[in-house]
Amino acid sequence: MKDKEKSKEQLINEVAEMRKKLAGMKKREREFQKIEKKLQEQFVEYEKLSAIGRLTANVAHEIRNPITVIGGLTRRLETSVSFGTKEKEYLELISLEANRLEEVLKDVLTFSDKTIFHRDEQDIHEVIDESLSIYKDMCKNRSIGIQNFSSDVPKLYIDKRQIKEAIKNLISNAIDAMPNGGIVTITTNKELLNRKNYVTVMITDTGVGILEEEKRMIFEPFFTTKMAKKDIGLGLPITKKIIEGHGGFIKVDSTIGEGSTFTVYLPYRAAIEK
């Protein structure tokens, strides 16, 4: 009798254990369903964005040729109009706006098109020096000092032209953040993160800073923190695309009234490390 009671008790325990496992399975099933639904929503959103990207690229291609023609003809007309007249002023304005539209369209096409990287071994300090040389006169005119601190980092397997474009965009962004002058500081270093080796390029300004709610949006196309909305562009989104295309990423730290720091992380291979 005692053995029978014991068997009954065991059976009750086994049933309880099975119910517990079944409840756990149902819970996991609900979690999987939530994940599946989220992935489906993300996929739909991705497809929607891809379609918008293709449409944007096609529209940009169609607009680019007429804008180029308008700009070219306007510049030719400028040479035949007397200086100081209203007509000259209007033509200069048309030419200026046409040039601006050409730059925006160039950025749109760069952002929309699939980027092909032509990589070879490069010294990141050379890329930084060449990028800085473009802005030296601008910084001097705006009372902006430049500090460049180089450390011993390995060469990188990168597309020099593309990375130079990314660094230039970040330097330009730093300059724009300091309308009353300041200091741009560029520092290179090495960092081990999640068992992966990175060369870091840190670009710091002493400018106005970025609001916390805006930090999530600064890499979105056509978003700007600038007071002059006229200068809207795709510099930061293109920079993000280039860096991520090299297997890296960008971090942003900012304090209102003190400035911002954009840190680029570029992975390097041990095989090419000296």
Image (cartoon, helix red, strand yellow):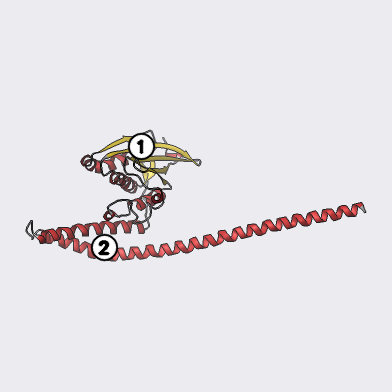
- x, y percentage for residue 250? 40, 46
Mark 2 lies on a secondary structure that is helix
Mark 2 or 1 closer to N-term?
A: 2
- Seen in the image, is 33 located left or right of residue 42? right
Q: Nearer the viewer, residue 202 or 222?
A: 222
Q: Which mark is residue 187?
A: 1
Q: Residue at x 38, y 48 (%)?
A: 211
Q: Residue at x 25, y 59 (%)?
A: 101
Q: Which of the 4 image quadrants contains residue 27? A: bottom right
Mark 1 lies on a secondary structure that is strand
Kindly identify the amino acid type of the residue bearing the numbered disc 2.
Arg
Q: Which of the 4 image quadrants contains residue 171? A: top left
The quarter of the rendered structure image containing the N terminus is: bottom right
For residue 125, above or below residue 32: above
Q: Which mark is residue 64?
A: 2
Kindly identify the amino acid type of the residue bearing the numbered disc 1.
Thr
Observer-side mark, 2 or 1, equals: 1
Q: Residues within 10 Å of mark 2 (few under 14, many from 20)?
A: some
- Seen in the image, is 130 located left or right of residue 92? right
For residue 75, above or below residue 125: below
- x, y percentage for residue 232? 30, 55
Q: Nearer the viewer, residue 180 or 5?
A: 180
Q: Nearer the viewer, residue 50 or 172?
A: 172
Q: Residue at x 69, y 58 (%)?
A: 23
Q: Residues within 10 Å of mark 1 (few under 14, many from 20)?
A: some
The quarter of the rendered structure image containing the C terminus is: top left
Q: Which mark is residue 20?
A: none
- x, y percentage for residue 46? 45, 61
